[in-house]
Amino acid sequence: MNDLVFGAINGLAGLSPLFDAVGRFAAGPLIYLLFAAGGVSLLLAMRGRTRTDNLWMVGQVGAALALGFLVNRVLRWMELSRRPFESRPVVQLVQHEPGVSFPSNHATAAVTVALVVGVFVSATWGLALGVPAALVALSRVFVGVHWPADILCGAVVGLVATLLVRWAARLLRDRFPRSGGGGVEAPRLVSAPRAEVDAETVVLVRDPDQTVVLPRVR
């Protein structure tokens, strides 16, 4: 099946100079534009947020990308698959050295960028980046340097990394809830029921379980 799907996609290469040019662009420079667009979406989302929220957002994005690449390194170390052009005739549109192909770093990077932006930054931006991300991933098969299984595994790695980081971040937020300013909530002056105090007193509330009544200073 892997070889059959590869032949169907790579067999389209060389039939149209326009499609070939698009394929080369998607298999190469497009990944950098995708990262740049993801960075722009992140900067735009940081406007109007608190510093803590921005740190959480950037941390989750960075953690998901790092986890995805770490998993890829481990899988590539296992050398589960070689480049298609090493074992069968291909229409190869870009130059590439022989070596391990599973999973695809391009697919992992492209899919992870779109996912982390969609999950942690903006769903709208994530959907928009999903189109070029898919183009980057599929183009690696089109130009003849990756098997479809390489692309599929790379996409799954990006998805799992994103979901794991999201789950871990929620656990951390639940275990270490943030307080309003920088850790300790400041005392608040509030109005008290007339049955408890009169005009000569004021209520100092530190938390729902601590209420101190003080004489009003004139």
Image: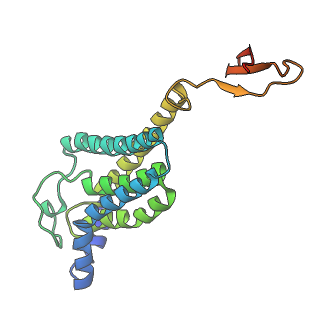
- Residue visible at 73% across and 14% down in the picture: 214
Q: Position of residue 33 (x, y in %)?
A: 29, 64
Residue plotted at (33% across, 51% down): 153
Pick the front one: 215 or 177: 215
Left/right of residue 84 with respect to residue 46 in the rendered view: left
Measuring from the top left, give residue 74's x and y in whole percent: 24, 39
Q: What residue occupies the far front of the structure in this picture?
A: 218
* Above or below, comparing residue 201 to residue 112 in the picture: above
Whether residue 176 is visible here, answered yes or no, is yes
Where is residue 93 shown, x and y percent of the image? 17, 73
Residue 146 quadrant: bottom left
**Quarter containing the N terminus:** bottom left
> x and y percent of residue 188 in the render?
66, 26
Task: Tell me: residue 70, above or below residue 1.
Answer: above
Towards the viewer: 98 or 54: 54
Q: Residue at x 76, y 21 (%)?
A: 202
In the picture, residue 19 is in which quadrant?
bottom left
Give left or right: position of 52 versus 135. right
In this rendered view, identify the residue nearer to me: 181 or 98: 181
